[in-house]
Image (cartoon, grey):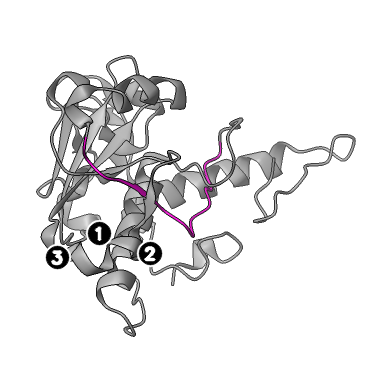
C-alpha cells in the first residue's frame, strides 16, 4: 500500500511509491523539446524519469486508444498509460482500429455478459475525447457491429467538474476498471490481487496533489465541501 494515499479513495490500492515522482524535475522532452514533467503528452514518452523507476503493468489484451483530433492532449489522462505502451497503441480518429469498444451507451452490455465468449476477444478500443466529441466517433460506420461494453462497478475520481454522472470515467480509469473486471470475469472465484492498480500510478499522484492544494487554499470563510468519496471540491 502507498502511505501517501492513506486518506484517499486509493487507500487500499497496490500502487507503488511516489518517491520517483517527488524527486523528478521539469525537463525538456528529448523529441519535441517542450517543457514537461513526468511525460510528454504529445510525444508519449517519459521526461525526467528513467523507465526503471516507474511501475510497469502486464496487460492480457491489446489496447487501442482512439483520440479525437480536437481533444487537447494536456487535458487527457490517456498519456498516463504511456509506460505500458507495448500492448497499447495511440491512434487518431482517422485510423480507427477494430475491437471491443468501451463506451457507456444505451446498448452497451456489462462485461460479465460476455463471459461465455470472452476467450474469443484479445483487444479493446477506448475513446479518448470529451463526451460531446465521442458521439461523432461512436457513430462512425467503421465501428458498426462492434460490441460496446459497460463497466458496471466503477465510479470516477476525476478532479475536473463534469456534468455527467460519476460513472463516466476518465480514459485511464476506464482502462484500469476494464482490466479489473476482465480479471473477475475470466478468473471466477480468484480474488483480485491488485495486479492492474499501477495503471493509476500517475492519476492517483495527480489526484493527491490536487486535493492537497485544495485543502491548503481553503479558508474558514469558504470551507471546502466533500464528495461522497471524500474528495475536496
Name the foreground residue: 50 vs 159.
159
Could you tell me if the residues under marks 2 and 3 are in contact, i.e. CB atoms within 8 Å?
Answer: no
Q: Main secondary structure of the magenta part?
A: loop
Q: Is 36 above or below relative to 48? A: above
Q: In this rendering, does residue 16 appear at all?
A: no
**Residue carrying label 1:** 55
Looking at the rendered structure, the secondary structure element under dot 1 is loop
As drawn, which residue projects farthest toward the top? 70
Residue appearing at x 41%, y 27% in the figure: 75
Q: Examine the structure image and report whether residue 98 is included in the region drawn in magenta.
A: no
Q: Is 227 above or below relative to 153? A: above
Q: Examine the structure image and report whether residue 146 is included in the region drawn in magenta.
A: yes
Looking at the rendered structure, the secondary structure element under dot 2 is loop
Name the foreground residue: 54 vs 124.
124
As drawn, which residue projects farthest toward the bottom? 189
Dot 2 surroundings within 10 Å: few (below 14), some, or many (20 or more)?
Answer: many
Task: Between label 3 and label 1, give the one nearer the viewer.
Answer: 3
Image disc number at residue 24: none
Q: CA distance from mark 3 to mark 1?
A: 27 Å
Could you tell me if the residues under marks 3 and 1 are in contact, i.e. CB atoms within 8 Å?
Answer: no
With 33 as the anchor, is 129 left or right in this view? right
Query: Where's the C terminus, which quadrant?
Result: top right
**Residue 115 at x, y = what percent?**
27, 67
**Residue 205 at x, y = what percent?**
44, 50
**Residue carrying label 2:** 15
**Which stretch did the figure color magenta?**
145-159
Residue appearing at x 56%, y 33% in the figure: 160
**Residue 48 at x, y = what percent?**
24, 39
Residue appearing at x 53%, y 47% in the figure: 167
Q: CA distance from mark 2 to mark 3?
A: 28 Å
**Residue carrying label 3:** 119
Amino acid at each position: 500500500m502507498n502511505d501517501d494515499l492513506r486518506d484517499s479513495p486509493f487507500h487500499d490500492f497496490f500502487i507503488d511509491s511516489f518517491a520517483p515522482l517527488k524527486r523528478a524535475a521539469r525537463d525538456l522532452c528529448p523529441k519535441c523539446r517542450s517543457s514537461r514533467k513526468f511525460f510528454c503528452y504529445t510525444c508519449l514518452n517519459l521526461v525526467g524519469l528513467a523507465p526503471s523507476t516507474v511501475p510497469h503493468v502486464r496487460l492480457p489484451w491489446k489496447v487501442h486508444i482512439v483520440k479525437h483530433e480536437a481533444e487537447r492532449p494536456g487535458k487527457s489522462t490517456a498519456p498516463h498509460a504511456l509506460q505500458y505502451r507495448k500492448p497499447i497503441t495511440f491512434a487518431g480518429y482517422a485510423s480507427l482500429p477494430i475491437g471491443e469498444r468501451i463506451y457507456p451507451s444505451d446498448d452497451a452490455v456489462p462485461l460479465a455478459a460476455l463471459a461465455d465468449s470472452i476467450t474469443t476477444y484479445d483487444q479493446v478500443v477506448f475513446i479518448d475525447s470529451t463526451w460531446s466529441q465521442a458521439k461523432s466517433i461512436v457513430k462512425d460506420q467503421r465501428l458498426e457491429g462492434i460490441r460496446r461494453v459497460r463497466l458496471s462497478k466503477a465510479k470516477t475520481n476525476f478532479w475536473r467538474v463534469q456534468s455527467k454522472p460519476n460513472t463516466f470515467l476518465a480514459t485511464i480509469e476506464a482502462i484500469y476498471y476494464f482490466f479489473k473486471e476482465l480479471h473477475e470475469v475470466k478468473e471466477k472465484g480468484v480474488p483480485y490481487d491488485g495486479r492492474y492498480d499501477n495503471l493509476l500510478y500517475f492519476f492517483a499522484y495527480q489526484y493527491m496533489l490536487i486535493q492537497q492544494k485544495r485543502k491548503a487554499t481553503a479558508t474558514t470563510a469558504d470551507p471546502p465541501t466533500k464528495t461522497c468519496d471524500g474528495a475536496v471540491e
